[in-house]
Structures are given as C-alpha cells and as structure tokens.
Amino acid sequence: MIKVKSHIAAMGPYKPPWTGLDRSGYLRLDLNENTLDPPDHVKEALKSYIDSNRIQMYPEYEQFMLKLSDYAQTDSNQLILSNGSDQGIELILHAFLGDGDIMMIARPEFPIFTQVAGVLNAKVREVSFDENMDFPFNAFMDAITSDVRLIVLINPNNPTGTPLEPEKIETILKKYSHIPVLLDEAYYEYTQATSIGLLKTYPNLVITRTFSKAFAMAGLRLGYIIANPEIISQLYKIRGPFDVNSCAIAAAQSQLDSPGIWKAYIKETMTRSKPFLENFFEEKKVRYFPGAAHFMLVQPQNRDHVVSYLKDHGILVRPMFAPLIEKTFRMCVGSMEQTKRFATVYEKYLQEFYP
Ligand SMILES: Cc1ncc(COP(=O)(O)O)c(C=O)c1O
C-alpha cells in the first residue's frame, strides 16, 4: 500500500456542500457566488479570445498586470496573480509556514487556511468569535505569542460576515511587525473596506483578493495578492509560471474595462436586497447575523428542515457545521428579484410549519 505523509493521511477531506447535485437549475445562495449570469461582454470577450487562436500558447500576463495595478491602485511589482485566491492563500502559507509553525486565526473561518496549514504540518491556534459573531480582539491579541509565524485576518470574515475595524488591523500590524499578517479581502468590492493604504507603513501586510465574487468568475479561478515587492518576489518562486489561465485573464480584463454591470449588481445587493432581507427576518422573528458583506448567517428554529425545504423549492443555502454556528445556514443575497423569490418561499415555509 502506497502511503502519503502521515499528517496528510490524518486530515479529513474538504466536503463542498451539495456534492453530486447539478446546481445549475437552482437559485444558488450557498457559495457566495455572483447569483446572476455573467454579463454578455464577458462571454463575448471569452469567445473572441478563443477565436483569436491563442489557447495553444502559454498565457501572458504583462498587459493585464498594468490594468490590475490601475484597478487596485498599486504598483504592478506589488502584485502577483493566483489561481483563485485559494491559491494566493496557499502561496502565502507555503512561504511562511513549515513543520510545527503556528498560524493564528479566529474561528469559524474559511476552511482553506486550516487545510493548507494541515498539509504543511503547521499548528493552527484558533480563537473563537464571540456569541454575537464579533471579532474576539482582546482574546486574539492575548493568544499571539512571539513564536507565531503567521497571523490570518479575514475582513469581513466568511462565514460570520464579521467586519474588522481598520484601527484593529493596524494595531496588530504595528504590535507584531515581525510577523507576516495575511489579510483576506475576498469581499472588498461589496464592503469597499481595504487596508491597502497600510502597505507603505507595514511591510508585514499581505492582502489576498479574488475575481470569484463580485466579478462573477468563480469558475475561471483568478485571484491576486498585494504585498511589498520583496514578499511578491518570493511568492513568484513558489507559484508556477503559468498557473493562471488565459481565459480568466480575458474575462477579468473585460470586467475591469466595463464595470457597469458588476457595480450595479453590488449596489442592488447591498442597498436593496440585503436591507429587504433583514426587514423580512426581523418581521418574521427569524434570528440572523447580518455581517458586512452580501451574505449572512441565519439561525432558524429547525435549520435542517428549512434547508431541505428551500432545496425542494429550488433554492440552495449552506448549512454550517462549525462550533458556534452549527445551528445556522449561510446564504448570500442576490438581485431584488431573487431575494423576493427567497422571501416568498421562506414565508410559505413559515405558514406551513409555524402558522
Ligand atoms: C474569505 C474567503 N477567502 C477566499 C475565498 C476563495 O475564493 P476563490 O479561491 O474562489 O478566489 C473565499 C471563497 O468563498 C472566501 O470566502
């Protein structure tokens, strides 16, 4: 029997929700994706890229890097592309963590961090969010010891939606200036909250972002890291030279050139759909944790029952299993039309089972 390393054999597998189900026919509120079809200009950009007979060539990134540095308002030597921000996270953990090294993170967190730390046989020191899903700032600070090798902050956190105040991020960067701080800004476009301005002062800051959410490109896998040029040059040694595919670049270029549709969608989700949904849950007395981005945790009386009812009525949400949130499901907010559809089904559920 061929054996993998024992610490990898000891790990549990990552299980995406609804494995084996064709999600395409559902209203998908389960994975924090963009809930609309990709804009026509993106589809056209992909078709014309394919028609230009270049998929047989290895990808070239130079032009796109200039466009991205313009969008991210940073120099291109402060950027590296990644195959989804999952790979960005993986590159950073590979750069800073080895056998037995300690990574600090607040729990419940997005699972890729503990998965990659597990692969590297690093130790994860977790501090739990409090009952209201607030960031456990004091306990987190107290738990950081001088032997910590990487601090992970997610702003806003997935799955709790918890925002992290810029002052708190700066306090951590300043106090632990000898420790790299990975700041995940996957939902930046929804919250407009970024700590990119701190990069000049704090060379220990490393930011990850993604094209999977606001840009409706989760299936194409594109993310990027923003950090000081010395860190970026180290990360280039870890990433493969062509890990990001050229179709992702063509689509991302089109989204950056024509931001009208994705910006309007974000505005609709954040200023109309989310307040509508919050009102709905208030009215119906369903407990929820709104968070800062376009997704929220909902804690109904019987979580599994609601989740399967919604599924039977064409709507996917994600039941959560981590401690603290094991009675909740996470859902993202889509367009107004989709949100009203969700509310109609949920209301029907309440009428049927809690008249
Ligand atoms: C906080 C956070 N980071 C990273 C990711 C990974 O995104 P991707 O690999 O699709 O860029 C996600 C996806 O849900 C996320 O919520």
Image (tube, rainbow, N blue to C red):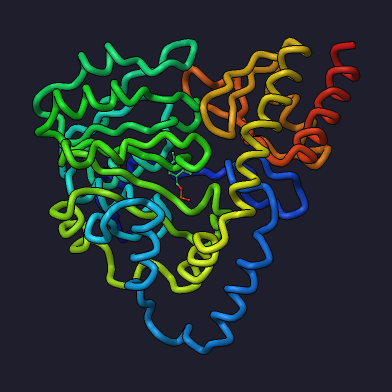
Q: Nearer the viewer, residue 135 or 124?
A: 135
Label total for image: 0
Q: Nearer the viewer, residue 203 or 109?
A: 203
**Position of the N terminus by quadrant:** bottom left
Q: Give the answer, above or below, for where 1 lies relative to 167.
A: below
Where residue 69 sits, quadrant-wise, is bottom left
Q: Quadrant of ligand 1?
A: top left
Q: Residue at x 14, y 27 (%)?
A: 176
Q: Give the answer, above or below, for where 274 lies relative to 188.
A: above
Q: Residue at x 13, y 22 (%)?
A: 145
Q: Residue furthest bottom?
A: 53
Task: Give residue 8's position: percent from left, percent from top.
Answer: 30, 47
Q: Describe residue 280's horizontal placement relative to residue 108 as left or right.
A: right
Q: Give the answer, above or below, for where 66 lies relative to 194.
A: below
Q: Residue at x 21, y 17 (%)?
A: 143
**Position of the C terminus by quadrant:** top right
Q: Residue at x 21, y 62 (%)?
A: 236
Task: Give residue 170's position: percent from left, percent from top.
Answer: 24, 26
Task: Give residue 31's position: percent from left, percent from top.
Answer: 58, 42
Q: Nearer the viewer, residue 9 or 48?
A: 48
Q: Describe residue 16's horizontal placement relative to residue 122 as left or right.
A: right
Where residue 169 sits, quadrant-wise, is top left
Task: Give residue 33's position: percent from left, percent from top.
Answer: 59, 46
